[in-house]
Image (cartoon, grey):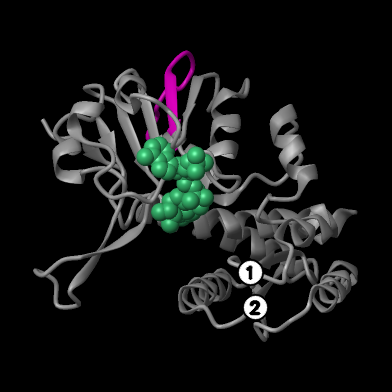
Amino acid sequence: MPAELIDGRAIAARIRAEVSAEVATLKVGGVVPKLTVVLIGDDPASAVYVAGKGRACVEVGMSEDTIRLPASTSQPELMRLLDALNADPSVHGILVQSPFPPQIDASAVIRRIDPSKDVDGFHPVNVGKLMAGDRDGFVPCTPAGIQELLRTCDVRTRGLHCVVVGRSNIVGKPMAALMMQDTPTGNCTVTICHRYTTDLASYTRTADILITAVGKPGLITADMVKPGAAVLDVGITRIPDATRKSGTRLAGDADFEAVREVAGLITPVPGGVGPMTIAMLLRNTVRAAQRLAVA
Ligand code: NAP
C-alpha cells in the first residue's frame, strides 16, 4: 500500500489560522506584529521567497516591510541598518534573506540581530538555547515545521531512530537537535549523515524517521528506505520535465513515486515541508511580538 501523504499545505493553513487569531488578539492591545525583511541585491529566487513571506504576513494581518538594498551594500551600512531595526519597537522580527553578496560576512550579520527579534532562529543565542533544550529561544522555521508535521500526523517519536541527511545550520543541525531533545516530539536516537558518510543507505535503511535536506533529486531511492518509515523531504530542486508546459518541475531528494511504495508516511515536493517553513516564520514573529509586548 502506498505511503500516506503528509499534506503540508493543509497543516500550514491551520497554523496560519491560529497565527491570524493571535495577531487579532495582539491588535486589540494595540500591538501590530511586524516582520522586517532585508533583501540585498537582485537574486531572483530570493526576491520570490521574500515576496512570498510578505504576502503571508499580510494574509494573517501582520505588518511587513521589505528593505531592498543594492548588491554593493557595505558591511558597516548593513550593520547600521540592523542596529536601527533592533532599536525600533515597532519591529518584532528581523530576517536578512540569504544568499549574501561576497563582501558581507554572513555570521557577523546573524550575530548582530537582537536574539529576541531573530525569528529565523540562527543567532548563536537561539542556537545555544535549542541545544540546551531551553524552549524560550526561536527554533529555525524548517525544522520546527517538520516537527509540527510529525506531531500533527501523530508520529510517536520516542525511542525511534531518526536519520537526518544533511548538516546545514538552517536545516540539518537544528533538526537533529530538535529530534534528540527530551520533549514529546523528540526523544529519538539521532544519526546525522553528510557528504562524507560512507554507505549512506546502511544508515537510512535503519531510519524510522528519515529527514533528508540535501538538494540532490533522486538521492534517496526506495531500497534505502525502511518499510513503513516516515520520510520528510526538505530538498527543493528545479529539474527539467518535458511533460510540463514550463519544461521544469520541483523535485525533492527522494525518488518520490518509488519511495512512496515503501514508506508509511511521506511529504510531497512541493506541498510538504515547504509551506510549513513560512507558517513557522509567522508563528515565530507573532511569538516575538507577544514577548516584546509584555517585556
Ligand atoms: P546545504 O547548506 O547545501 O546543505 C546540504 C547538506 O547536504 C550538506 O550538509 C551536505 O554535506 C549534505 N550532502 C550533500 N551531498 C550529500 C550526499 N551525497 N550524501 C549525504 N549528504 C550530502 O543545503 P540546505 O540549505 O540545508 O538545503 C537543503 C535542501 O533543502 C535544498 O534543496 C534547499 O533548497 C532545501 N530547503 C528547503 C526548505 C523548505 O522550506 N522546504 C528550506 C530550506 C532548504 P556537507 O556538509 O558535507 O557538505
Q: Is residue 52 magenta?
A: no
Q: Is residue 157 magenta?
A: yes
Residue at x 47%, y 79% (from the top left corner): 44
> Is the C-beta separation of discs 2 and 1 under 8 Å?
yes
Type of the residue with mark 2: Ile
Percent position of residue 95, x then y: 68, 65
Task: Examine the residues drawn in magenta and state their main secondary structure.
Answer: loop
Quarter of the figure that contains the C terminus = bottom right
Work out whether mark 2 precedes mark 1 in sequence or the reverse, and give the earlier one.
2
Type of the residue with mark 1: Phe
Secondary structure beneath disc 2? strand
Tell which of 197 and 187 is nearer to you.
197
Residue at x 69%, y 62% (from the top left corner): 25
Choose top left, top right, bottom left or bottom right for residue 103.
Answer: bottom right
Eyeballing the image, is 172 above or below 186?
below
Q: How many marks?
A: 2
Percent position of residue 244, x then y: 14, 71
Eyeballing the image, is 166 above or below 34?
above
Along the horizontal axis of the image, is 41 left or right of 244? right
Secondary structure beneath disc 1? loop
Tell which of 85 and 25 is nearer to you.
85
Eyeballing the image, is 239 above or below 14?
below
The 10 Å Cα crowd at callout 1, few under 14, some 14 to 19, many 20 or more, is some
Q: Which residue is mark 2?
A: 40
Real-space Cα separation, disc 2 to disc 1, in angstroms: 7 Å
Q: Which residue is mark 1?
A: 100
Q: Which residues are magenta?
A: 152-164
Tell which of 238 and 196 is nearer to you.
196
